[in-house]
Every structure is written in C-alpha cells, then in structure tokens.
Image (spheres, coloured by chain):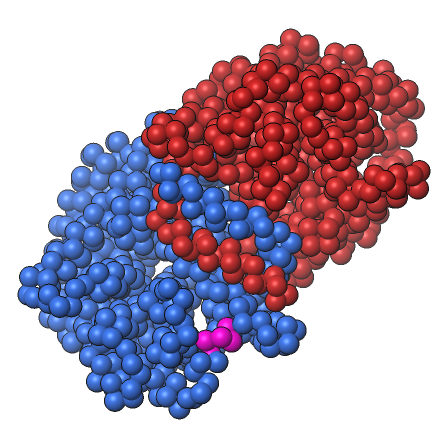
Chain colours: A blue, B red
Amino acid sequence: MGFASGTMTEAMDSLSTSDHASVVSITLFVTLLCACIVIGHLLEENRWMNESITALIIGVGTGVVILLLSGGKSSHLMVFSEDLFFIYLLPPIIFNAGFQVKKKQFFRNFMTITLFGALGTLISFIIISLGAIAFFKKMDVGLAIADYLAIGAIFAATDSVCTLQVLNQDETPLLYSLVFGEGVVNDATSVVLFNAVQNFDLSRFSTRGVFELLGNFIYLFISSTVLGVVAGLLSAYVIKKLYFGRHSTDREVAIMMLMAYLSYMLAELFYLSGILTVFFCGIVMSHYTWHNVTENSRVTTKHTFATLSFVAEIFIFLYVGMDALDIEKWRVVSDSPKTSIAVSATLLGLVLAGRAAFVFPLSFLSNLTKKSQNEKISFKQQVTIWWAGLMRGAVSMALAYNQFTKAGHTQERGNALLITSTITVVLFSTVVFGLMTKPLVRFLMPSTDKLTSMISSESLTPKSFIVPLLGDSHDSEAELFIGNGVNSEAREVCRPPSIRSLLTTRTVHYYWRKFDNSFMKQVFGGRGFVPYVPGSPTERSVHNLQEEPKQ
Amino acid sequence: MGFASGTMTEAMDSLSTSDHASVVSITLFVTLLCACIVIGHLLEENRWMNESITALIIGVGTGVVILLLSGGKSSHLMVFSEDLFFIYLLPPIIFNAGFQVKKKQFFRNFMTITLFGALGTLISFIIISLGAIAFFKKMDVGLAIADYLAIGAIFAATDSVCTLQVLNQDETPLLYSLVFGEGVVNDATSVVLFNAVQNFDLSRFSTRGVFELLGNFIYLFISSTVLGVVAGLLSAYVIKKLYFGRHSTDREVAIMMLMAYLSYMLAELFYLSGILTVFFCGIVMSHYTWHNVTENSRVTTKHTFATLSFVAEIFIFLYVGMDALDIEKWRVVSDSPKTSIAVSATLLGLVLAGRAAFVFPLSFLSNLTKKSQNEKISFKQQVTIWWAGLMRGAVSMALAYNQFTKAGHTQERGNALLITSTITVVLFSTVVFGLMTKPLVRFLMPSTDKLTSMISSESLTPKSFIVPLLGDSHDSEAELFIGNGVNSEAREVCRPPSIRSLLTTRTVHYYWRKFDNSFMKQVFGGRGFVPYVPGSPTERSVHNLQEEPKQ
C-alpha cells in the first residue's frame, strides 16, 4: 500500500512539474480532437473514409508539422503510454460495446464467437510465431525465441475498436456480432497469451506447461466474466434498493459510471482480464441497471457512454498517428531500409495467413453444428469476417511497446526494427485494409445490406431519437430473429427459420426468460421495473402495462 | 513545442512505470467515491451534513487506515497535485456552475458580485496580510515579506465548491447568486493576486506598481471573459451550421464537452484566468449552444456536466481529506504544537475578520445604489453572506502548496508550519463552518426560505424530470423577478417592485433582448431555434410556436 501510493506520488509529482508544457500538449490535443469530429462529420457520407482513418491521418499530419517546427530534432512527440491506453482509454470503449451490443444476437452466437476468439486467436498466434521464426532467422534480425512468441501474441490481437467503426450493427447484425464478439474475446486471449509467453520458462517446456496455460486461460475467462456480472448486478441492486433518482439523476449516472470503471479496475487488480469483465458488466448493466433508473438517467447514460467511447477511439487513433513519427526509432532502422520493409511485409503476410487459417476452417466447423441454412455462415460472409478482422491497432501497439522497449533498449537493432514494423503494420492495416472494408462489405453482401436495412428502417433508423425514450426497442432488432410472433409483419421479409432450430433456440431462451422474470427481475429490477416516483399514482398500472408485451 | 512534448513524455513514462501500484490507488479511490455517493444519499435528509463533509471525513478515515496498515511509515499517501486539481477537477465544476446558473439573477446582481469578488477579495487580502505580519512576527515563525503577502492571497480565496453544496439555488436564489458569483470572481482575483505577489519586486514598490497590478487585473478579467464568450459562441455556431445531431447525438455531446474544456485550456495557455473563461463559456453555451442540439443531447449534456462536476467535487474533498494526514509535514511541526495551534487559530481569526471587513461595508454601498427595499441586502442576509464564504478549500490548498513546497524545502520550519496550518484551516472551516451553515441559513431566513420554495415548487421541484425536457423553464425562476406580466399569479406572492426599479431593469434587459433576438439568435441559434430533423414536417410551425411566449 505504501509502495502503491509512493509511486503514484512520483507520477503526480512529475505531472505537476510539467506545468505550462502539459497545458500546451493538452490544448493541442483537444483542438485536434475537435477537428477530427468536425472533419469526420463532413466526411460522413464518404463511402471510403471512417473516423479512425481520419484521426490517424490528422495525427500523422500533426506529427509532421511538429517535427518541422522543432527542426526535426524533437524525437519524442508523444510516446505511447500503455497505462494511458489500458487504464483510461480502453475501458470506456469496451464497456460501451457491451452496453450497446444486441444481447440476443450476441448470446445466440456465443459458441461461434468463443470458438473464433479463443481457438482462432491461438491458431493465429501459432502460425505467426512459426512464420516469424522461419522468415526472420534468414533475415538475421537477431531475436530470442521469447521474442518470436511475443510477436505471435502481438499480431494475433485484432483491433475491435476499428472493427466497430467499419461494420454496422444495424446493417449486418450477424457479422457485427461475430466479428465484434470475436474481437473482445480475442483481446482477452492475446493479452493472456502475451502474459503467458512473458512468464514462460522455455527451458522447461512440457505438455504439462501447455495444459497449465490452458487451465489458466479458462480460469481467467470464467472469473473475469463472473466479476463483470457480479459488478453489474451489484449496481442494479444498489440503485434499485436506494433509488438514487428520487433525489438526484446525477447520483445515478455517477454510480453507474463509477461501478463500471470499478469492475475494470478490480479485474486488473486481481490480474484478470479487465476487457472481458467490463464487457460483461456492460451487458448486465444494460439488462438490469439501466431499467432501474429515471428516464433522464437512461438517456444520459446511454449517450454519455457512447460519447466517451467515441472520444476515446478518436483519441487512440490520433495518438497512434502522432506517435508513428517518433524519430529515434526510425533512425536505427534507416540504415537498413530494405530489411525493415521486408520485416513489415512478412508480418502483414503472416497476419493475412494466420487469420485465413482459422476463419475458414472454424466457420466450416461452426456450420456443421447449425441445422438451418439460414444460420450458416456463407462463404461471402466468411471472406468478410476474415477481412474485417485484419486490422491491427492500439492493443498490438501497447503489447509491442511492452515487449520491445522495456529497460529502454530501443537502441538494439532488433527491437527498433520490430517497433517500427509494428507501427507500419498498424498504419497500413488500419488505413489500407480499413479503407477497403466498407466497399468490400457493400460489394459482397448487397442483398443482406438492403434486406436488413429494410427491416430495421421501420424502428431503428432514427435510433438516437426514439430508442432511449422508448426503452423497449432496445432489443427490437434481435427480437425479429427469435420469431415469437410479435413482429409478424417484419418476419415475412426473412426466410422462415426451420422448426427445429426454432425449437432448440426457444428452449434455452425460454428457461432463461422464466428464470429472469421469476427471480432475477424481482431482485435486480430490469425492464418492466418502474422506479417509484413520489406522488405518482400510476406506479402499479404502468408496471403491469410495460411487462405485458414482454412475455 | 519540443520541450512540451518532452515533459509530457516523462510524465507518461513515470505513469507507465507505476503499473500495478497505480491500479491499486485508482481502485481504492473509485471505491471510496462510490461509498461517498451512497453515504451522501443516505444522509441526504440530515440537516447538518453535506456531501463535502462526508467526503472529507471518509478521506481522513481512509488516511488513518492506510497509515495504520503501512505501520505509520507511509509519509506520502497521496500528495496534493496542483495540476490534477487545476487541469482536471476544477474546470468541470466551474463550467457546470456557469451552465446551470440562473442567468438573469446573475446579471441583475452583476455589479454587486464584481464589487464583492474583486474589491472584497482585495480588502480581505490586505487585512489578512497585515494581520499575519503583525501576529506572526511576534511568534517568530520566520517568514519573508513575500510569504506574508502570499498568505493573504491564499486565505482570501473562498471555496466556491463548498458554497455550492451549502446554499440552494432554488431556496435562496439571491444569496446563491451573490455568494456563488462572488466565489467565481474571487477565485480569479486571488489567483491573479497570488501570481502578482510572486512576481512582485518588493524593493521597487511604487504607486505605479499598484496601478500596473490593477491594470493587469482588469486586462485579465476582460480578456478571460471575452475568450469564454467567444468559445461559447463558436460552439453554438459550429453546431448550428453543421448540425451534428442529424447524424449523431454523440458528436454533439462530444463537441460541447471538448469546446468547453478547450476554452479553459486556451485561457491557461495564454496565462489568463481559466476559471472566469470557462464560467462565461458555460453561460453562453447554456444560452445558445444548448438550444441548438437535439432533445437527447440536451438531456445528456445537462446531466453529464452536473455529474462530472459532482464527482469532481467529491474527488477533491476525498483527496484533501486523505492528504491531510501526510506525516512528514506534521513531524516538523510536532516539536512546537503550541505555535502550530496559535498560527492556525490566528489565520482562522483573520479569515473571519477579513471577510467581515468587506461584506458589511460593501453591502451598505450596494444598498445605496438600490432604490427598492426589496432589492436591498438585509442585515440577516449580510450575515449569511459573510458566513457562507468563510470556508477555505482546494484553491487555498493548491496555492499554499505552490508557495510553500516549491524546490522541496518543506523541511524548513516556517514552510511546514504554514502547510499544516493551511490544512487545519481548510479542514476546520469546511467541517465546522460548513456544518453550521445549513442550520444558520434556516435560522436566519425561515420566511424567505418558505416563500421562495412556495414560488418555486410550482415549476421547479421535480426539476430533474421536467426542466431538461421542457427547455423553456430553464430560466423560469429568474423570470419571476423580472415581472413582465407572464407569471402574474406567482408575482402576487412577492412584494411588487417599485415602478422606478422596474423601469431601469427593463430598459437594459429590453435592449439586450432586442439585440439577442434580432442578431445573436439569427447567427448562433439559441432558445427557439429548432434543429432541422429530416422528414419532420413541423419544422416551421414548431419554430414559431416556441418563439411566441418568449417576446
């Protein structure tokens, strides 16, 4: 404890000595963020661009300007800080993803998502590691075995942030839930793999070690999920019992934000996967807590979480863009530009191959378990999944910095080479692959695109206007696919699912609903729970009224 | 520029080395924040307590626990960081104050507020400085003349944060606007005074120097205000022109938050008073920008700003409470406990005297300019104003740390003595004076209390439910005091203002309204501006409908 606060003190001391300098940096950064938002808005209609790419390009541009202003001398424009990323920027993004995700769609595809996210990442990791060993040994890069394994973990991490921006939850719900769900599990898997690799004693490599790794992963996955669920339920219970809204909307909003963040920090405290925890906390909060608060709190939390996530995303890309120009690292590499290009190209190739190596086989496996043709992943969809997960982003950067800059030996050729290659791969994959994803999705799936947008346009297009106020349409789209007879006119557009798949889905869903209604909602509130407003006579009647169409 | 980023790098580097340690600190802090909110909610009905005092007590309690856990060795639990306070915590609080302040009430009392905030603070500064010189020289504390002047500036800074929690805008609108408005101007004045004192060459003391100081203050006041107004108008213009809401509520919310913060940082960048800037930016944003965005953005921004401010306030008090136990400072002082107590008591006495010395005379002056009995500040109100501004808080702490810990010479007896005395004064005034303010206000003004709550209960009690959705009642209470015939049944409760005062107020207000409607609202939007929603046929008619009752 003493140590903890001691270090925090140092960090703060050095922050407070920065004085006017940090004011300059922050002003510059906030201005750039504003610029990104305005430009992003103006480019909204553009079919190639998205906000990430805009931010990256503005970041690189600003980097160039600062470099010129400082006469090419400033080697540290803004160094990538792992803590800033993992402690402040990532949690709001992942929490918001859990909060806004279409829950039914996500849980329906849970097995496939886990298969892709866990097994797929492992396959990708193995292929990239082996490939790196094979190619880089010839190139005489000069790395240890541990470094090669780390490379595997670093480049197995897809960028769920970028994916969110490229795929549209309303246009391609199945793909979105698969690719994004995979991204979340993948983040957790690659962080776990990376930590395992760092602590791995290669001299004592054994089958037992592999099983330990596996056990460790399963333990992490389950305990992180449980922690997130518990934190979410706790927030629902506290708000339902104390009912803050009676006095202050602000208290409700504050407690929701703080509890969400607390779940992430607790996971980090216990060395679990904060990403998984905060994701499940978001899901539980949107299912229970969100319905226990006042109307105003609902609108506020929904948009605040989305805004924070939005700003954090832009911040990350701006940051990565500016950091890409750190001269010192490039100086070491500039002696051998050919090797550098070769390394980057090899890594890009391995990323492409590693992802292909699991998307197609695992999709085949997943399709075997599905009975209905409608639920299977078509080849075109497989190509999209493969492509949409190719981008590498901030997680890769953070891990690469952790592996190759520790103890400050960036001067070593191998390390500098890998840092610059990571930057190259991140920039290239985000910009080039990113630019091509939107057109690719449109090209491969024009029909789905049209079809789903037809369905969703009825209730979802003016989403930000209606959804938070109605509350009930939170899951409306997912509801369409369950086919429980409520939205019959919408269902006509879809191919009717086979009776068998309808039954199996129904049973699992049916028991969960029963348990949810008879126990969970009694204790934790949730949809249908109407906060008691003093002086409102409609308390009971509204309660019944809202619960009716849910059965 | 190069230097700027270099220092930021160091700060971030040291942050990233803190690793697990900072995770522990943050987790602890977030948990305590949650605890404060829940306990604050439970104590809501208590007439003595408020959230600040709860947070302070919890902070001190936690400090004790950590001290015991670390075996009394941990001297740095959490060192007060000026930057954390001035860059991250203060801006949201002051911005929100400007955003939620009743504008008409504030501008009606503008002259009195400036008189109290600027001249009053100066009087207080002189009395405290002179008193410190007189008393401390006898006690042999061992300080330079510059230190005495600094003490004057440090203890002339009232705590607007704490005042916000003690007085209620709806119950005592006049007092709230006076005390809080004074607090904002006072913050700016004392920071300006403090900087002036630090740069002041005492050997070349002259009348010209005093005039330079005065000129500097006026320049700061005007330029800071103009910057805030410009930033606010710019945000209104940008949002009106681009109309972000068409695509995304999140963009609107993000741009409002970022622009507000940018105004503060720009002021700091140009060495102006960020507090004044962000306060006026808040006022302009609530008058124009807020009306240009979608319904959802309005609800979201209103509550998000309030929540951020709320959390920042609790954070500050928790932080001050925990920092109060930093052993090292107390160790130096513990040799001479009597001197320490004497110094603290003297400072408290000077604070009381310094405030009395300007509240009563300036109230008298202010009353001379008012024609109507109703507008004059009664003696009971004067006592309340005097008392409510006695609390010293985070601004005093920040300035004291700046003056007495720089270059790390806390070991010197005089410096250590003044740091501990500042902590004592802050804790004592916040807890003891703070605890007594609520009962005092109730005791001194039971009638006003009842009266105003009668008026306001009609439209304002379920404030958080209705106000943000109606939008129009934003200023409803202030409107009552203008007496332009709209709320005639409410006015019956008040004593009718004399015709003369009605006329003078009306002319100023009338011309402003005319200008506002004919020019400002055309360019910058504002109340009555209806954002164009695609597919909404009511665009024009709603526009006219809303503007009607405003004239």
Q: Position of residue A204 (x, y in %)?
A: 10, 65
Evaluate whether residue A257 shows in this view. no
Q: Who's the residue at 87% across and 26% down the image? A: B502
- For residue A184, which quarter of the picture? bottom left
Q: Residue furthest left?
A: A207
Q: Who's the residue at 38% across and 79% down the image? A: A413
Q: Position of residue A368 (x, y in %)?
A: 11, 70
Q: Is residue A109 above or below residue B331?
A: below
Q: Is residue B316 above or below residue A128?
A: above
User: Is A138 on the left-hand or right-hand side of B459?
Assistant: left
- For residue B456, which quarter of the picture? top right
User: Is B164 on the left-hand or right-hand side of B79?
Assistant: right
Q: Residue furthest bottom?
A: A338
Q: Nearer the viewer, residue B326 or A130?
A: B326
Instruction: Check the picture and name the quadrant holding the C terminus of chain B.
Output: top right
Q: Nearer the viewer, residue A358 or A371?
A: A358
Magenta stretch: dominant SS? Answer: helix
Residue A327 sits inside the magenta stretch: yes
Please give the range of residues in magenta: A326-330
- For residue A444, which quarter of the picture? bottom left
